[in-house]
Image (cartoon, rainbow, N blue to C red):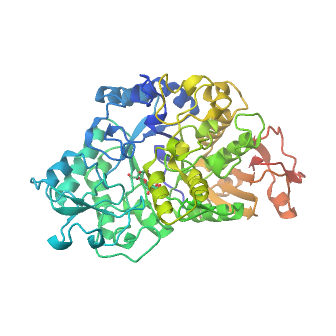
Amino acid sequence: MSPQPAWWKEGVVYQIYPRSFQDSNGDGKGDIPGIISRLDEIAALGVRVIWLSPVYKSPQIDNGYDISDYYSIDPIFGTMEDMDRLISEAKKRNIGIVMDLVINHTSDEHQWFQKSRRREDPYTDYYIWQGLPASSAQSKKNLPNNWTSFFMEDCWEYDDLRGEYYLHLFHKKQPDLNYKNPLVYDEVKNILQFWLDKGIAGFRCDVINVIWKTSLADGKKSIMLTGLEHYKCQEGNHDILQKLRKDVLSNYDCFTVGEAVMINLDDAKLLSNADRQELDMVFYFDHLEVDRRFARFIPKQFSAAQLLHRLTKWQQGLDWNAIYFENHDQTRIVSHYGDDSGAGERDSHWERSAKLLAALQITLRGTPFVYQGQEIGMTNFDFSSFNQIKDIETHNLNRLMKKLCFPAWLRWKWLKLSSRDNTRTPFQWTAGEGAGFSTGQSWLGINANHTKLNYESQKNDADSVLSFYKKMINLRRSSEVLKYGEFKPLLATKKLLIYSRESVQTENSSYKEAASSEAYIIACNFSGKRIKLSGEARVLLQGTLAVSNIGRTQWNTSQTFLEAWEAVVLRV
Ligand code: TEU
């Protein structure tokens, strides 16, 4: 079935991690005036929406995903006046702003929590408190249940003042809200309304499929996330999303994309298929874990066939997809599925594979989300010790692995591969000191490769990774079939994948429509070696060249090879 057209399906979203994007006052942390100063560069990429990771007031224990006031801006990022200016300056460029909505938990420094600790009404039951018999209250062995957190710790913290434990699925400074209390729902409704009335374009909803805890009973023991079955995608969770849609979101021209953790396709359909009236799209993780075990932590062999298989499942299974290859919790895609060797150099494997990944992402069916720095092919960090890592998740994991007696070299190997700081290093604007990000000491290390790999050197270079992203985004904008057409897998091997985008043919399509319909065939060589095309692949690869990532000017249909990291987009 052809999806209902919508502006947020046609545009591209650009994710900004404000702390690392552009500093304007020399404190080493990015800020909102910095973002405003770069709006022209963002507009030049051809994006329709900016998603801002949290800029609300926060003690910054989890870089803003621990909110202490939903109605004010953290001073490190600026003021509410700056925020209003960002919204209006972006609007002038036809760019909508999407806010990050973190409502599973707040910071423990939020006044709701402070009042809840003191049992001050109406806040007493805003969080999930559990008492224990006095005799066992402070013994670690007697926690209210056996759940484990996303950051690999116990999920319960004892609060002396209240004399009870509170639940935290993430860090202990991120207590979970209690959605069984209708007052909490009302607070959330007000937050949404406040920001939508300011003219924002929607929300990216953090861990939105775990907000309703059906029961607090012990969970089935598991290496990761014991207790998950009591709170993942529960009926009560769906009810809240439907209610928010009906009460608030449906009154505005906006969209929502929900980060949904540990989900399968059936969960995703319930959360995002259009007739359900919950979210518009979901972020799932399956396509980024082809070469990983235990979420993204332990490496295994990559296979292009497995990637195509997973992509196909979601491309064909959902009404509409959110297509992302990077975000602030992941690693850089060129270092992950590509090859970052020769970063910043012309025609290196870095340049080819960064472009190949752009060609893949932008020709999939769904709204593309490009993470800051992805458009210039930024790579994983080049840190050499744990001291340079700031991410709390990485430090928690390190502690846990140490407790389990993993040797230091293995801990480093795996954590370097998975640390969230890989995508959090400052944006590389220039080759100069501070990479044009800040005149001060930046809060996190800047990758040494900024001297070769930076925005300035790519902006006027027609063959740069940046120009390639622009070209792909333009192509998508101009093509109905790339926006709304069907996705069909055609062929895959360990290194090669081929698929098509074709017009949606219904029983009612006229002969003329069918005959004039455009299609695209996309082929990607996921290897650093030239590969020979099989007879079957050669039959499939017919058409005129729309895009090449290696500077081909035409496609010869008797072509028998794809070069190292080559991608071709053919128009049929
Ligand atoms: O992330 C939720 C989440 O489950 C992960 O991606 C998680 O951070 C971890 O990497 C699992 O291995 C969201 C935010 O994107 C993240 O930055 C926050 O730390 C987290 O929620 C808590 O708000």
Provide residue 522's location: percent of width, then percent of height: 72, 52
178 w.r.t. 329: above or below: below
Q: Residue, x 44% and y 31% (percent of image)?
A: 30
418 relative to 424, above or below: below
Q: In this view, does 204 lie to the left or right of 453?
A: left
Is residue 366 visible to us here? no
The image position of residue 35, as x and y in percent, is 45, 29
Circle count: 0
Q: Looking at this view, is 543 or 225 the one in front?
A: 225
From the top left corner, tell me how far across and down residue 390 is, in percent: 46, 44
**Residue at the (62%, 48%) spot, across then down:** 333
Which residue is at the front of the view, 289 or 25? Answer: 25
**Residue furthest to the left:** 121
Give the side of residue 15 with respect to residue 343, left or right.
left
Residue 270 figure quarter: bottom left
Residue 54 is situated, as x and y percent measured from the top left of the image, at 38, 41
**Residue found at x 53% / y 50%:** 419
Q: Can residue 519 be seen in this view?
A: yes
- Above or below: residue 230 compared with residue 90: below
Q: Tell me the quarter of the image containing the N terminus.
A: bottom right
- Quarter assignment of residue 432: top right
Q: Which of 555 and 213 is in front in this view?
A: 213
Q: Is residue 250 left or right of residue 555?
A: left
Left/right of residue 501 with respect to residue 28 in the rendered view: right
